[in-house]
Image: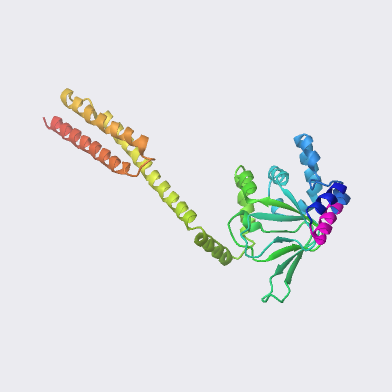
Amino acid sequence: MEQLLSSMNLMRLPLDLQNRINEYYQVMWERHGTLDGQPLVFTNELSKNLAVEVELFVRMDMINRVPVFQQCSKKVVQDLVMNLELQVYLPGDYIVVKGEVGMDMYFVQNGECEVTKPPATRLGNDEVLKKLFQGDYFGEIALLMNCKRTANVRAITFAELCVLSRSVFEQITDKYAEDREKIETFITEMYDPKVLEAIMKQQSLDNPEKTFHARLTKQMAEIFDFMEDSAIRMERLEWMIESMLGRGASSTSNLHANASQASMRKESYSGRHRGTIESNDEMRKAIQDVSSVLEHQERIHNKDTSS
């Protein structure tokens, strides 16, 4: 602590800021016996199972109070808990500010916070909308989409919050589709459909390039599906051709040559159809060639039958 005081004096920090820093270290020492802000750092030395047990024990009360965790399987809960980040706030610290784009969900592990609405004028005071206690959470919609915070949240007492970032959430839930669907359903059902629609509309306005890219990707996927289906149909036509070949030596060689050309066009298309849209014209041409072969084979068959 003497080194800390010496460092703050050398930096000529304001007395009020020094007092807040000193208060932070005092509380961390009283609660966790640590000064580095990492109360569970020793779990890095434990086995994976022991580390999970420690984390779950420390945060069990919080987990049991959060309905969204109750919807998930045990494995998902463990993975999420092990990837939560602990953040500490002193009384009066703002955790989120109205208007900023949210990327994290917060869980109150210890302490007390309040949700406030900024005053209409600079001289006014924040309006307290709600108080948050251990086990409460906020910012869950930020896990699913970009949207601006609708209110301020600040700490009333010394508060410890666990933070779940969107990147961590997506990384974990990508492996558990059913649990992800449950979480998404739980979160979206908390909001009015009109509110969600407005959020998504605003998101598309704020990120037109991403919205266009998503729409373009969907359209391209539909085109590729159609082209792949066309390739399957062409393979069936080729099979029909092969089954009909062999009725005449001279005509057979010509048919094989035409079928081979059509097959080469098809193989050339298969190797490139995902790289360029122009190959769709080549597909149509190959199908036309196959149709011509079929018509030619049918004329020969009819001629042989009549003779």
Residue drawn at (64%, 44%), measured in percent from left and top?
A: 172
**Where residue 208 sits: x, y (%)?**
48, 58
**Foreground of the two, 260 or 118:** 118
| Residue depicted at 21% across the width and 29% down the height | 255
Instruction: Pick out the residue farthest to the top.
Output: 249
User: Is 133 on the left-hand or right-hand side of 1?
Assistant: left
User: Magenta segment: does it hold 25?
Assistant: yes
- The one nearer the camera, 246 or 203, is 203
Q: Is residue 283 above or below residue 87?
A: above
Quadrant for residue 41, please give it: top right
Occupied quadrant, residue 132 = bottom right
Any part of residue 197 in sight: yes
Q: Which residue is located at x 38 percent, y 40 percent?
A: 275
Q: How is the image coloured?
A: rainbow
Image: magenta residue range: 13-26
- Answer with the quarter of the image where residue 259 lies: top left
Task: Please state if 46 lies on the left or on the right of 261 as rendered.
Answer: right
Q: Is residue 212 above or below residue 253?
A: below
Front residue of 79 and 33: 33
Residue 143 on image: x %, y %: 62, 54
Q: Where is residue 220? Give x, y as percent.
A: 41, 48
Q: Which image quadrant: the C terminus?
A: top left
Q: Residue at x 58, y 57 (%)?
A: 146
Instruction: Count numbered badges in the picture.
Output: 0
Q: Residue furthest left?
A: 307
- What kind of secondary structure does the magenta stretch mostly adopt? helix
Residue 105, position as x, y percentages in the image: 68, 55
Is residue 245 a member of the stretch shown in magenta? no
Question: Is residue 1 in view from this perspective?
Answer: no
